[in-house]
Image (tube, rainbow, N blue to C red):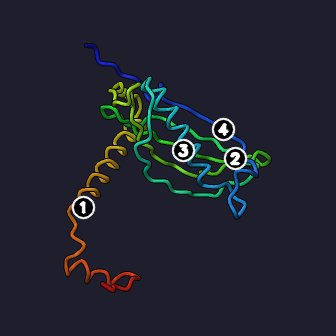
Amino acid sequence: MEEIYRSVNDSKVTISELMLPSHTNFSGKIHGGYILMLMDQIAFACAAKYSGSYCVTASVDTVDFLNPIEVGELVTMKASVNYVGNSSMVVGIRVTSENIRTGIEKHCNSSYFTMVAKDSNGKNVTVPKLLLTSPKEVRRFYNSVKRISLKNERNRHEETFDHTTPEALDGLKHYRVKLEL
């Protein structure tokens, strides 16, 4: 059976949307939940475009809101597949906003969504292998490998750390907590 490769360019998706008053939170800025919804949509579109399959969100990593987004700004999201596993893909998303009157742009967010390709019965399906064609794509791939490794290490630590030991309980004195067991 011939191996199938697709390029990062095969996955790229860009969306832009004007931010409206209906998208605001109580402080008058664009609600982070609304931005996350748009990010989930573009992650789906990117992963589905790359894999040719229906995709679901497995996890969201590193959502840092760097700058607030104002009503009337044009938000642009760019997504591409940075890493592929067997059925999973890491989609990198960059969010910028532009004041359409002044042309000033702000970087608002960069995030990584892990998407999983599914068949019509909800079973995982194998995605095409990734063809890397530039040093930037290699860097993004290795950064994804590193994030996955760190996440796995953190999960192993959470599974093995005994929070009930005297040492662990004594360590709480370094935090802003009071222990009453």
Q: Residues within 10 Å of mark 1 (few under 14, many from 20)?
A: few
User: Disc 3, disc 1: CB below 8 Å?
Assistant: no
Query: Is 105 on the left-hand or right-hand side of 167?
Result: right
* Residue at point 30%, 84% (across, down): 181
Q: Single out the mark in the foreground, 4 or 1.
A: 1
Query: Residue 171, image x and y in percent?
Result: 27, 80
Residue that mark 4 sits on: 16
Sequence order check, earlier mark of 2 and 4 = 4
**How far across and how far down the image is residue 177, in percent?**
39, 82
Q: Earlier in the sequence, mark 1 or mark 2?
A: 2
Question: Residue 36 has which mark?
Answer: none
Going by the numbered disc 2, the residue's amino acid type is Glu
Q: Distance between the residues labelled 1 and 2?
A: 41 Å
Tell me the residue that label 2 is attached to: 98
Is the residue marked by circle 4 packed among few (<14), some (14-19), or many (20+) residues within 10 Å?
A: some
Q: Residue 157 carries which label?
A: 1
Give the residue at the far top of this rendering.
1
Q: Earlier in the sequence, mark 4 or mark 3?
A: 4
